[in-house]
Amino acid sequence: MYLDLVEEGYDDIKFVGVNGYAYINNDYHCMICDTLDECSNCTEERILPWVQDVPAIIIEEYDNQLDCEENNHSWGVGDQIQWNLLGETECIENGYTWFHGECIEFVYGCLEDVDIWGNWDITLRDLVIVNKQGYEVSRLNLTGNNPDPNSTCGENYQTIKDLIIGAR
């Protein structure tokens, strides 16, 4: 659909997929079809930029717990860095944590909640259409509305396409 829209002259429409945090460890290859020979649902690679939703990000502006919490954020572990080349002794000597045979550095910071799926009340296969100002103008779950142009005589495909064009 994106390529059709571009071909028709709509160069101001952008698509992006947001993989829910609950699915962070799932294999994404058959979602974007970059391994055609391994995916039964793929005939060609899908051109769709996508990002991974996370529960929080580190805000660099506040580098201590007091400032962070005074600005209504939470202080906690923002990142975990795994040091594969360190043995247990070296790991502990460097101030890191030895846990189940792995050396882990916990990076603390000021955290801001960013859970997109939670904040937007998104469920699996939701298509959320936003306008240029970033406001939601339409929402449709694709589970019951197959966007495949060869399905439902192309009716769903055209409806979704019209919604996207209308949001401009």
Image (cartoon, rainbow, N blue to C red):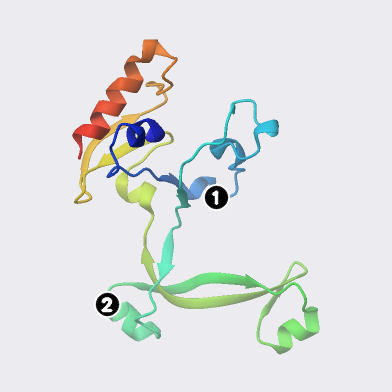
For this rendering, which residue is in front, 7 or 67? Answer: 7
Residue 94 spot, x, y in % from top left: 69, 88
Q: Is residue 107 above or below residue 23?
A: below
Q: Is residue 102 above or below residue 122?
A: below
Write down the quadrant of residue 97 in the picture: bottom right
Identity of the residue drawn at 73% across and 82% down: 91
Residue 152 spot, x, y in % from top left: 39, 11
Residue behind mark 2? 71
The first of marks 2 and 1 along the sequence is 1
Labelled pair 2, 1 in contact (Cβ < 8 Å): no
Write down the quadrant of residue 12 in the picture: top left
- Indicate the quadrant containing the N terminus: top left, top right, bottom left or bottom right: top left
Helix or strand or loop: what does disc 2 sit on? Answer: loop
Residue 166 spot, x, y in % from top left: 19, 33
Identity of the residue drawn at 42% across and 25% down: 143
Label 2, residues with CA under 10 Å away: few <14, some 14-19, many ≥20: few
Identity of the residue drawn at 36% across and 41% down: 122
Label 1, residues with CA under 10 Å away: few <14, some 14-19, many ≥20: few
Tell us which disc is closer to us: 2 or 1.
Answer: 1
Q: Is residue 98 above or below residue 53?
A: below
Tell me the amino acid under the disc marked 1: Ile
Helix or strand or loop: what does disc 1 sit on? Answer: loop
Find the residue positioned furthest to the bottom: 93
- Does residue 93 appear left or right of residue 24 in this picture? right
- Does residue 100 appear left or right of residue 116 in this picture? right
Q: CA distance from mark 2 to mark 1?
A: 29 Å
Residue 43 spot, x, y in % from top left: 59, 26
Q: Which mark is residue 150?
A: none
Residue behind mark 1? 24
Identity of the residue drawn at 45% across and 57% down: 54
Write down the quadrant of residue 165 in the picture: top left
For this rendering, which residue is in front, 153 or 66? Answer: 153
